[in-house]
Image (cartoon, grey):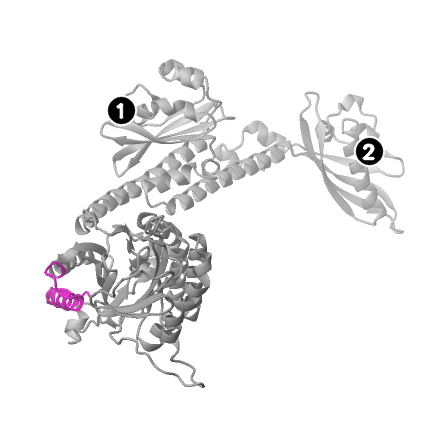
């Protein structure tokens, strides 16, 4: 290096360092005599006094550690014996004070005509300053890499934070402190003139719980940093305790040695403050201070976004709540539970809705729907449509008329949005459900034995579009809800998983309904946890669960109800098994075989000769001698007729079997259908059939 070296001119290295880096001597080693001639500078590099040097090579390396001497000897011998013309090596020479001086030898091997080495000449240079400088640069670069990593990892973690809770989770969750390069953290927000510490993370920092909410004054270092807008770097907790006496008792219980208190400012607004605590640090370099300030700026920006998001979400939630029913009316004969989950978006406003409407004659209307879109306009349209549909339903119109009028109403609004929905009128006294569908998912029904059915509701076009295209037909489907059964309505957000066919979502919903608890509120919670938390965050979800109250009868006169789908052989088999098991459980095993046989006959007749399913009721008649009554209700008005089957006939013996096994049987009209019943056990003496009953008698009749 020369005087013109820019590093010397800039002051990056001092004069003494520059001279040391340029201390170079020379040597001439006669291999034949074994002597070496070294100039004064070279001897100075080796740390040998010129007056005491005896010309022997071994004297030059006396200061070297034995391992270094052996390594140097191997390098020289290998170069000489290997035919090399030169060699170069670095080695440390310990000084009197124990510090090493790094030495660089660059030598040339002179050989005679036969290739025999007879002389080595070269230069020896003190490179201690170079090595130290390189180590310093390497250490500095390593520190900068660590700092860059801290900034990058913290920025990446906070970039995914949406809410204030997300920000605190990113800072205090797994790996949070490691990302910050700290051993402890306290995060506070300014709220209504107070500093509220919303997060504490680190060993024993829970001792500061008593200081979580304080008036914003200068009594604590974090509050002082917030008020002054200036950071405070603390290298001594003792000094910190003297400056803030109220904090002193807490500091004695903390395992940290240093801390920095940083204001969190974004767009000239003071949001709060952040404190970082360190175990092994006792001072802060300029780079470390800049790093802390940079982290504070990153956290402040994330908090600003999160606070704005939370404020918008709170506003949106309030708007959504005003659009949805404030109160669900109490119903007689059942229970209803509703849930609404907003999509995971900035405003969390959508067009999904539910409603429960009290209707004349003790009926109840239930609806779940979805207006196209996820914005405030969709929410506004939803609110208007919900009120209109409620009004039409409250007037007592048939379900098909309610949807036709709602479609007309939506088409007349100044909007290009459409809506889907499912609406049903439910009579819980009889279990009759009259349902219509407008481009929406149909209901699910959980039966008393846990099976889940998906009734086929003939559907019309979505509301609004149906009027535009002149297709205001919404076919009505009648369903039967027996005591203890549950009906589930939802919007597609509960069953749509990104990248998966909706049928997979419906299957998952069916499985969740089947495995869930029977109570409506518990079932709604179960479905929310199982499905919405799994994949429903990308869309709104409206959910309505209605359960008809179970009808267990009494201990003296127990009762069961079960619905059997048409063309369901397994359901028929399950119903027979349920009847037999119930009678055995009720202490009447002697009647189970006959009851199972008659159950099969009654159900087969209905499922073969009518359109639709059947409701089976098994009950015990306690007076005066306990008897069993089986009843199968269907929607057909055609009554069974007695036939005389031939010897080769495969049918027509059902009523003959009833005569043979039942003590009494008959047919009764039931609304739009009929009920075929039979009794097993001793006949009632003198009993008549009663009005409107066709009755036959068998054994004992």
| Highlighted magenta segment, given as a residue range | 393-420
Using the numbered discs, state the Cα–Cα distance from disc 2 to disc 1 in whole angstroms: 78 Å
Q: Is residue 433 above or below residue 102?
A: below
In the rendered image, the residue lying farthest to the front is 686
Describe the element under mark 1 as helix, strand or loop: loop
Q: How many neighbours does mark 2 have within 10 angstroms: few (below 14), some (14-19), or many (20 or more)?
A: many
User: Of residues 263 and 663, which is closer to you in this image?
Assistant: 663
Above/below status of 500 relative to 587: below
Q: Dividing the image into 4 quarters, which one contains the N terminus?
A: top right
Q: Which residue is mark 2?
A: 36
Taking the spot 42% from the left edge, 26% from the top edge, the residue there is 206
Examine the image and state in which quarter residue 48 appears: top right
**Location of residue 147 in the rendering, given as x and y in whole percent from the top left corner:** 47, 38
Figure check: 589 above or below 656: above
Which mark lies nearer to you, 2 or 1? 1
The C terminus sits in image quarter: bottom left
Question: Does label 2 or label 1 sit earlier along the sequence?
Answer: 2
Residue 433 in sight in this render? yes
Residue visible at 36% across and 48% down in the picture:
555
Give the x, y percent position of residue 140: 52, 36
Q: Could you tell me if the residues under marks 2 and 1 are in contact, i.e. CB atoms within 8 Å?
A: no
Q: Secondary structure at mark 2?
A: strand
Residue 284 sits in quarter: top left
- Residue 375 seen in the current view: no
Q: Is residue 108 left or right of residue 125?
A: right
Q: Position of residue 55 (x, y in %)?
A: 83, 29
Mark 1 lies on residue: 216
Circle 1 packing at 10 Å, graded few (<14), some (14-19), many (20+), is some
Q: Is residue 402 covered in magenta? A: yes
């Amino acid at each position: 290096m020369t005087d013109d070296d820019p590093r010397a001119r800039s002051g990056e290295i001092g004069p003494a360092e520059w001279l040391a880096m340029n201390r170079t001597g020379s040597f001439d080693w006669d291999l034949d005599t074994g002597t070496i001639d070294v100039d004064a500078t070279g001897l100075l590099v080796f740390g040998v006094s010129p007056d005491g040097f005896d010309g022997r090579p071994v004297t030059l390396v006396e200061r070297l550690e034995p391992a270094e001497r052996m390594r140097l000897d191997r390098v020289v011998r290998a170069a000489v014996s290997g035919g090399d013309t030169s060699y170069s090596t670095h080695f440390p020479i310990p000084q009197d004070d124990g510090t090493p001086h790094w030495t660089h030898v660059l030598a040339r091997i002179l050989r005679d005509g036969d290739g025999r080495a007879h002389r080595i000449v070269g230069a020896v240079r003190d490179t201690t300053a170079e090595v130290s400088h390189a180590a310093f640069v390497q250490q500095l670069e390593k520190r900068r890499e660590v700092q860059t990593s801290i900034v990058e990892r913290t920025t990446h973690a906070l970039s995914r934070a949406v809410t204030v809770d997300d920000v605190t989770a990113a800072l205090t969750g797994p790996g949070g402190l490691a990302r910050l390069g700290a051993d402890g953290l306290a995060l506070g927000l300014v709220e209504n003139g107070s500093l509220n510490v919303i997060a504490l993370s680190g060993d024993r920092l829970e001792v500061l719980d008593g200081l979580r909410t304080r008036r914003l004054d200068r009594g604590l270092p974090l509050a002082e940093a917030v008020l002054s807008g200036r950071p405070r770097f603390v290298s001594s907790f003792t000094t910190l305790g003297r400056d803030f006496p109220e904090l002193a008792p807490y500091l004695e219980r903390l395992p940290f040695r240093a801390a920095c208190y940083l204001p969190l400012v974004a767009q000239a607004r003071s949001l709060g403050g952040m404190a970082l605590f360190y175990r092994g640090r006792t001072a802060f370099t300029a780079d470390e201070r800049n790093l802390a300030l940079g982290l504070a700026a990153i956290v402040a920006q994330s908090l600003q976004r999160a606070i704005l998001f939370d404020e918008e979400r709170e506003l949106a939630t309030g708007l959504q709540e005003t659009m949805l029913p404030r109160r669900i009316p109490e119903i007689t004969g059942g229970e209803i539970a509703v849930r609404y989950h907003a999509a995971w978006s900035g405003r969390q406003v959508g067009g999904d809705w539910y409603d429960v409407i009290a209707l004349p004659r003790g009926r109840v209307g239930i609806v779940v729907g979805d207006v196209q879109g996820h914005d405030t306009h969709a929410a506004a349209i939803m609110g208007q449509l919900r009120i209109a549909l409620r009004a039409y339903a409250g007037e007592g119109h048939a379900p098909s008329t309610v949807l036709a009028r709602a479609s007309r109403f939506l088409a007349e609004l100044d909007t290009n949005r459409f809506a889907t929905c499912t609406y049903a009128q439910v009579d819980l006294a009889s279990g009759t459900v009259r349902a219509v569908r407008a481009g929406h998912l149909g209901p699910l029904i959980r039966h008393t034995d846990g099976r889940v059915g998906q009734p086929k509701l003939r559907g019309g076009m979505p509301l609004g579009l149906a009027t535009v295209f002149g297709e205001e037909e919404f076919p009505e489907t009648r369903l039967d809800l027996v005591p203890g059964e549950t009906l589930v309505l939802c919007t597609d957000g509960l069953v749509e998983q990104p990248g998966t066919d909706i049928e997979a979502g419906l299957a998952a919903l069916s499985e969740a309904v089947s495995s869930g608890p029977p109570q409506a509120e518990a079932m709604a919670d179960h479905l929310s946890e199982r499905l919405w938390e799994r994949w429903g965050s990308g869309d709104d979800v409206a959910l309505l669960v209605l359960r008809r109250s179970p009808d267990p009868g009494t201990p003296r006169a127990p009762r069961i109800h079960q619905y059997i789908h048409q063309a369901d052989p397994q359901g028929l088999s399950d119903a027979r098994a349920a009847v037999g098991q119930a009678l055995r459980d009720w202490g009447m095993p002697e009647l189970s075989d006959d009851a199972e046989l008659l159950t099969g006959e009654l159900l087969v007749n209905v499922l073969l000769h009518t359109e639709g399913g059947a409701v089976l009721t098994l009950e015990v008649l306690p007076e005066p001698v306990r008897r069993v009554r089986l009843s199968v209700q269907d929607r057909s008005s055609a009554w069974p007729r007695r036939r005389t089957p031939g010897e080769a006939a495969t049918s027509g013996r059902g009523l003959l079997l009833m005569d043979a096994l039942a003590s009494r049987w008959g047919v009764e009209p039931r609304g739009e259908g009929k009920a075929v019943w039979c009794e097993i056990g001793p006949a009632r003496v003198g009993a008549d059939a009663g009005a409107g009953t066709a009755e036959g008698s068998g054994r004992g009749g």
